[in-house]
Amino acid sequence: MKAAVLVISDSAFAGGRQDRSGREILRLLSRWSVEVACYEVLPDDEERISARLAELVDREGVRVVLTTGGTGLGPRDRTPEATRRILHREVPGMAEAMRSHGRERTPFAMLSRGVVGVRGNSLILNLPGSPQGAVESLEAVLPALFHALSMLEGGGHPEP
């Protein structure tokens, strides 16, 4: 599985803050033997985020794109809007599972507006910007993520 991690943060992009959430996602993916073809930091710019998401899936053949950051209520938090612009279909159950899992740990998880969806045969997941929130959200859906990728390729449900 070819994956990409996009950190969405004005301050990290400008060099004023070190990225921690993207690095934690990379560590988690390496434990699952997932090949990360791309790790980038982008500013909170809706046009730029949408364009890069589409490019990663359409031109670079990335099967899973994980974004971290830009999912809250801040005035520049536009990752969900940028993602929705290029999705073919949403997968609301995965986004709900991430928020539900997080809500068991902190009441602030309910403030995440992250979406999960499909473009072509790839999945795009918006994770929170906090390192702990990003890792916990990804852990909540990782088993289903592998099954979802199989289904996007025409695979069926596993036999009981």
Image: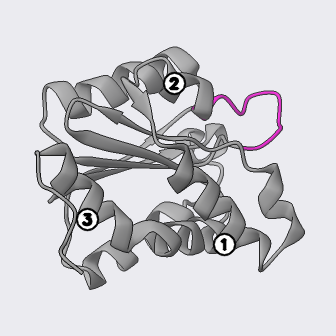
Is 122 included in the stretch rendered in magenta? no
Label whose residue precedes the other's in the sequence (1 or 2): 2
Tell me the CA gap for discs 1 and 3. Answer: 18 Å
Q: Residue at x 76, y 44 (%)?
A: 72
Q: Determine whether the residue tagged by mark 1 lies in a helix, strand or loop.
A: helix
Looking at the rendering, which quadrant does residue 17 occupy?
bottom right
Looking at the rendering, which quadrant does residue 103 occupy?
bottom right
Amino acid type at circle 2 is Arg
In the depicted view, which residue is nearer to us: 23 or 146?
146
The picture places residue 16, in percent across and down from the top left corner, at 65, 49
Q: Residue at x 66, y 72 (%)?
A: 101
The picture places residue 28, in percent across and down from the top left corner, at 38, 78
In the depicted view, which residue is nearer to us: 144 or 112?
144
> Is 155 left or right of 81, judged from the image as shown?
left
Q: Determine whether the residue tagged by mark 3 lies in a helix, strand or loop.
A: helix
Does residue 26 appear in this view? no
Q: Determine whether the residue tagged by mark 2 lies in a helix, strand or loop.
A: helix
Mark 3, mark 2: which one is toward the viewer?
3
Tell me the CA gap for discs 1 and 2. Answer: 22 Å
The picture places residue 11, in percent across and down from the top left corner, at 66, 43
Say which residue label 1 marks: 101
Q: Residue at x 12, y 54 (%)?
A: 155
How many residues crowd mark 2 within 10 Å: few (<14), some (14–19), many (20+)?
Answer: some
> How are the residues colored?
one colour
The picture places residue 70, in percent across and down from the top left corner, at 65, 40
Is 73 included in the stretch rendered in magenta? yes
Q: Quadrant of the C terminus?
A: bottom left
Q: Residue at x 32, y 44 (%)?
A: 123
In the depicted view, which residue is nearer to us: 150 or 28?
150
Does residue 98 appear in this view? yes
Say which residue label 2 marks: 84
Give the residues in magenta. Answer: 72-79
